[in-house]
Each structure stands twice: as structure tokens, then as C-alpha cells.
Image: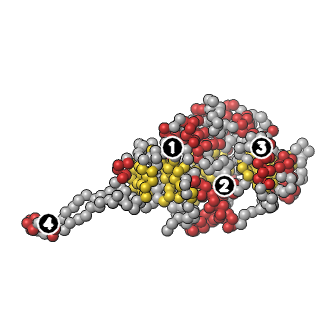
Amino acid sequence: MKELRSRSCSPRSLPASTALALLGVVACVSGPGPEPADLVILHGKVYPGAGAPMAEAVAVRASEILAVGADAEIEKHRTESTTVLDANGGTVLAGFNDSHVHFLSGGESLDRVDLFDAETVEEAQRAIREFAAARPDAPWILGRGWLYGTFPGSLPTKEQLDEAVPDRPALMECYDGHSVWINSRALALAGITSETPDPPNGLIVRDAQGEPTGVLKESAQELMSEVLPAPTREEKLELIKKAVRHALSLGVTSVQNAGMSPDEFALYAELERRGELLVRMYAALGAPPGFSEEEAARYEELLKQHPDTPFLRTGAIKMYADGVIESRTAALLEPYANADSTGNPNYSVQDMNRIVEMMDKKGWQIFIHAIGDRGIRMALDAYEHAAEVNPPPARGRRHRIEHIEAVSADDIPRFTKLGVIASMQPFHANPIPNVLEVWAVNLGPERASRAWAWKSIQDEGGRLAFGTDWPVVAIDPRPGIHTALTRRTLEGKPEGGFVPGERLPLEDVLDAWTTGSAYASFEEERKGTLDPGMAADIVILSADLFALPVEEVKDFEVVTTIVDGKVVYSRDAGAVTSRQP
């Protein structure tokens, strides 16, 4: 319907006596009508975020939220030109903001064999064999996602991969990204033999005779870089665009890219200039051991050359304190329960403190991957040291620790004390055999009792930001939401839940994926809630999540994704490819 707008009237339209009485200076004023909306969403279960009261409808003007309220209130903003979306009783909330992804790798994973659901060696081999048969001309067979618990002894062998791919080199990345499984042809191409030394912070897994078994851990993976086929720049751009469309189809409107090179950042900058970066991105640049003042100066120059835009921002670095618990490369305070080793941190205490102090002084935010209790403590200690020696940065400190799988009880309150954000990925705690029979066994019951302690950190006043670590697991928020709510597998096991005291209520889970992630990238005043004036990044879901039994919350579908006030994905029409001028 056409919205009636207010209008003014001049003194000449008034009776002459009235005009004279007012000396000819008369105005007829009526109150202004509701501002027209470009888009409205009606008949929804609207969760504005951050514990705000539920509503029914949302109005959008240009790229911002105009109003949130009851259907009747929002209808007042509707005009003949307003786009109207019917939520049909589904939940409406701010777009998901994945606080930890590896976006280009995620795009690459979409074209590789996925082994995450393979529960046995035979299932993994069958998936690889079928993938290879469908690509007879591919020079390499590439895949990812295998789990330690799939294999006897927790590690695969080259012979097992040779059986699936005997005629070509093959490489399968572990789900966590910290190990690769390669066949005999790939080993030969890379020249890896019993004489090849282990690189710093890396391990070539060997048998009793010293021969490589087909698994490379941590930095040893880089031994394959010279022989692996590398995509061209244009191919990388297409992979990112494919990743964008995939993210939008799952309601993900923002991502935080946890570690990249300046060359990779330039790819996103190019797509942003083209109007083809439809997911908002906050990028952290990699800072390996030995990171120098000269390298920091290059990052500072990149920051000047690429000022923040609404779709691409940086100002953060990423460090890897340690590895992972499954392969016993995470750094622990005490030895693993089943090995005479505490793992090895990637940085010395002095080097980590130096880099953190240097970048904190320059005003950069710092992400530190830290999984074991020793790695976590090193990160917290480095942040505490920086706060003691540096004045506060202009925008404040919001340093982060990524993953936090096995934290010491003594360190849980320090997240609040130091203002450190707990960036966690709930689906990593999915209690499949990989977690219960490898992860938990490696740690022992006492440390495993604090597995992924997101509720304990929040209860102490710490801030959470949730994500997926794509492609470690799918960028789809639904499995992680389920894990955070239930601490059970998607099939509902174990019945009592894995460390069930760490379950969170639905509002807290959604907040960690929206408002928490926005805070973690210094963007809480622009996105993360559906308050008036905020960016119109919205997702419409197929179900009212708040009316479902907790075990069924995961079963929703994304109906519509809106970014910057524009529909960029619909279940019926798919995703768009560029931003309209």
C-alpha cells in the first residue's frame, strides 16, 4: 500500500482572518510519517541479539536496520516499492559471523575428497577411490578431513593410500590441518626418504626401520610444497568466490580469517574492489617464529595501502603457539597420559613475548592458536607482559586465544582479568571416537574434564566468539550450535553428554556467533545485533529455534541471507555473485 507522507501548508491556504491574526506568518505542521523501508521481514521470531526481547518483524532502509518490532509497527514502514519477505514463523537474527576460518583453504576443500565422515580405513579408501575414478586425468588426487580415530594406532600409512590410489601421487590433509597423509608416489616425488631430516617444529613419522610411513606432522608438511600443484591467481580468485557463495548459503555474512600472507590478502582486496567480496572479512596476517621488525613494517605499510572498507579489514596478526592434542604436538604443562612427552611450543617464551610486545605497541590485535594448557598459558603470559610494558593501544586491547581445547583450571579466570577473548569452535568438541578415544585418552581424565571449557570461561566473565575453523570442519554453523547446546554427537551420543557442564543455552550460543564475534573484531557498534542503525546483515531460518527441543535445533535450513540490506542468497534462487552499485 502507498504510505501517506506528511506535508506542509502555507498561510495562503488559511482563512484570511486567521492569516491576518498571525500576521501572515503561519505554518500548518503535522507530524512526520514513518520512514519508508526498502525491505521488511514480517511474521518472524526475531531475536535482535544480546538478550534483547523477541520481536516479529524488521524494517531495512538502504544498508541499515531501520526498525525492529511487531508486525503492525513494521507494516507502517512499508510502501509500494518495499520488498517484503515472509519469515513464516522462522527465526530471524543477525547474520552468522564465523570468528575463525581459513577461507581460501575452505574454497579449495570444496573441490577435494571429503573424508570427515569416514569411520573406518575401508570407508576412507572407498571415498578416495571413487573420487579418483571420477577424475582420470587429474595429475594428483587431493583430499582432506581424515580423523585420527579412523585408523589403528591413530595414524594412516602410505600403503593404505597406495591401495586407493596406486597410479598417481595423492595427498590427504588431516581434518585439523596439522598432518598430511601421502602415498608412495608423493613421497618419491618430494624426495622424502629415511635420510631426510625432520625440519624445525616438524616430524616425518617413521617406522621401526626409520622409513617414512606416509604421515608428515606440523612444519614437515612444507616438504610437499615444491611438488604439489599450485592454483594460479585466477583460480584462487574463483575458489574464494565459490567459498563466498557457499558461506552465504549457510547464513554466514562475516568471517574472520585466521592467518594469511600478504599475497592472499591481495586476492581479497581485488575481489573487494570488483564488488565480488559479498562476505565481510576481517583478516589476520601470519607472524611465524622469528617475526621481525622489518616484517612488521611491511604489515604496517599494507595497512596504509588498504584502509578499512565495510567488506575488508585487517589490523591483526596470527601466531601458532603449539600443535594439536591428537598428534601430541600441542604443548602441555605435564606429559601426555600415554607418552613421555609434553609436546613442543613453536615459539620460545622470549620470542613469543617479543612479538606480542612489538605488535601490541603498534596497536595490532593478536590471535594466538593455543590448544594445550602450556600453549594457552604462554599466550596469556605474553598478553600480560605486553600490558605491563606498553601503554594501552588507542582502540584498546582485544587480544584473542584461538581453540583453547585443554585449559588449566588456574588460567580460566585470567581471560577475564586480562580481557582476552576466547575464540572457540564448538564442533571441535563433537564427541565422536576421534575425541573420546584419541583426544581424551592422550590427555587423561583430569585434563579431559576441562575439554573446551567455554561455559566455565563465560561464567568467570570471559567473552566468547564462536566459529568453525573451516575447512577443519564445515563452515555450516548448525553442527557447532548443536555441540554447544548438547555436548553430544549429531546422533545424540553419549546420552549424558561429553563434559555436560559446559553446555550453553541457545541465546548464549547465538550471541557467541554474532555479537561475540563482532566484539572480537572491534565491530560491535556496526554489526552483530538487529538494533536500528546497525548493518542490515540478516539471516532468516526455516524454524523457530526457540520453540524446538534442544536436540532438534540443528535441523533448521537457511531460507534467506541478507548482506548490506540486499538479498544475497535465497533457498529457491541460490547466491548472487556481485554487489550491485
Q: Distance between the residues labelled 1 and 4?
A: 56 Å
- Tell me if residue 246 comes above or below residue 466 in the rendering: below
Q: In this view, does 91 lie to the left or right of 151?
A: left
- Work out whether mark 1 precedes mark 4 in sequence or the reverse, and give the earlier one: 4
Q: Do the residues labelled 2 and 3 touch (CB within 8 Å)?
A: no
Residue type at tag 2:
Gly
Residue 217 in the image, given as x and y percentages of width and height:
77, 49
Residue carrying label 3 = 123
Who is closer to the viewer here, 527 or 60? 60
- Residue under label 1, please give it: 543
Instruction: State yes or no: discs 2 and 4 in contact (Cβ < 8 Å).
Output: no
- Looking at the image, residue 7 lies above or below residue 256: below
Instruction: Say what amino acid the circle numbered 4 marks.
Output: Leu
Q: Which of marks 1 and 4 is in front?
A: 1
Could you say whether the residue bearing mark 1 is in a helix, strand or loop? Answer: loop
Amino acid at pointer 1? Ala
Tag nearer the camera, 1 or 2? 1
Question: Is residue 357 in view?
Answer: no
Mark 1 vs 3, N-terminal side: 3
Reading the chain from its start, which is encountered first: label 1 or label 2? 2
Which residue position holds label 2? 106
Position above or below: 486 against 524: above
| Rendered location of residue 467, percent (x, y) | 59, 48
Q: Distance between the residues labelled 1 and 2?
A: 27 Å
Which comes sooner in the sequence, label 2 or label 3? 2
Question: Which residue carries the number 4 mark?
Answer: 14
User: Which quadrant would the N terminus be assigned to in this image?
Assistant: bottom left
Q: Which of marks 2 and 3 is in front?
A: 3
Q: Which colour scheme is used?
A: secondary structure
